Amino acid sequence: MAAQPDFTPGRIYVPRWVQLAVLPVLLIIAWFTLGAIAQVVFIFAVAGLVALVLNPLVHGLERLHVNRYIGVFVVYVGFVAVLVLVAALVWPPVVQQLRNLTTALPGMADKAGDTITRLQRLSDRAGLAIDVQAQIKASLTAIADRVPSFTSNVVDVGVTVVRQITYLIIMIVISIYMLLDSKRIGRFVSGHFPTNNVSDGEEYVRRAKTAVVDYVKAQVLLSAVLGGSVGLAMWFLGMIGAFPSGTRYALFFGVWAGLMEAIPYLGPVLAAVPPSLVAVLDSPLSALWVIITFVLIQEVEGHILVPVIMGGRFRVHPLVVIFAILAGGEIHGISGMLIAIPLIPLVKETIVFLRPRTQFESWCAAADGPIDTVTDDGAAQRPEPDGPAAAV
């Protein structure tokens, strides 16, 4: 008679038939469901992230004997006030510099005669029938025509689009409810944790909150430092004449670099694109100075800032980051890409936490043999055989 599987109490046991049939089907259903209700998932994801970030502040007020309802109101009003203040101080000059840049691009292309002449010679030698100056000017003119309308739409969003206002209000309401009921939500997760162990659930909730909050705080600080460094560097290059356009558009370059820094691995490359393109139109030497500056900034970031601010616990493989970004883009466009990134540490923490608490029935064992278990360090372990075979 075949031996019955004997799994360790307090662990999630996954038999072979579930691994073969149920898990793949659940993944497929989850993917199509995410695509069908992408907007709902996006709203709850944003609201959840806001609630997780603000919850420590509310908890801090509770320690000062402030009623939680009052604490949520104070923290949320302060959070919105900070966002509005930052937007009011930074956004208008950034938009103005971007508009000025797009307006000046065609004229900058006309002045970049030496660079365009060299490119034209290279094109002629390669046998390419391309009018480099005409192509560059046409491309820059197209950008100049589109960006102002885009920035205008960004500034006016939430004022002219009723649906976006509705979504924003819903996000605020959901995040407030999450803040007010955070303890109840934590107790629910702890009481219904798959291992049937309340302490496991409480530990997971604590670690999940810490992972997301610490990542967001570290990323905001890193983005602010990198954005400020890039802006100051471009302004300095403009002041010494190495990059004449750097002074005029330093704020835009800095804000762009700070935003791109939120995208791991790909962000540093994307941050250097606008200033490098503008520098090429100034002169090849300006482009060289800009590239050297970005290389130096990225070296400082990679060897000093990231280890100090981020540490090693937030590091994941680049392929995982790229997959998350592309998946977020498929679900909800550019905003989905940005929201997917802070969810990476949450998923990572979930996998790390559940792995030693999950027991998969082995596919290598005989049908009536013992099954493998997973030890606390994540390694597979098979029970020792009994009887004479054990002495062999």
Image (cartoon, rainbow, N blue to C red):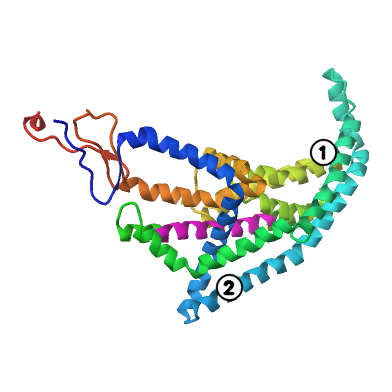
Residue extending farthest to the bottom is 65
Q: Nearer the viewer, mark 2 or mark 1?
A: 2
Image quarter of residue 157: bottom right
Element type at marker 2? Answer: helix
Magenta-colored stretch includes residue 207: yes
Our reading of the magenta stretch's main secondary structure is helix
Q: Is residue 166 above or below residue 350?
A: below
Q: Residue at x 22, y 37 (%)?
A: 382
Along the polypeptide, which appears first: circle 2 or circle 1? Answer: 2
Q: As shown in the figure, which amino acid type bears the numbered disc 2? A: Val
In this picture, residue 306 sits left or right of residue 248: left
Residue type at numbered disc 1: Pro
Q: Give residue 379's position: percent from left, percent from top.
A: 30, 40
Q: Camera-side residue: 339 or 193?
A: 193
What is the distance, in whole Å, between disc 2 and disc 1 at their CAs?
Answer: 50 Å
Residue drawn at x 59%, y 76% is 74
Evaluate whether residue 241 shows in this view.
no
Span of residues in magenta: 205-227
- Give the camera-side residue of 96 and 333: 333
Q: Report the quarter where the C terminus lies.
A: top left
In this view, the residue in front, 383 or 224, is 383
The residue at 43%/68% (across/down) is 183
| Residue 277 on image: x %, y % | 79, 41
Q: Is residue 106 left or right of residue 389?
A: right
Give the label on residue 75, or none: 2
Say which mark, if any, is on residue 298. Answer: none
Q: Disc 1 on helix, strand or loop?
A: helix
- Quadrant for the N terminus in the image: top left
The answer to whether 300 appears left or right of 151 in the picture is left
The residue pinned by badge 1 equals 284
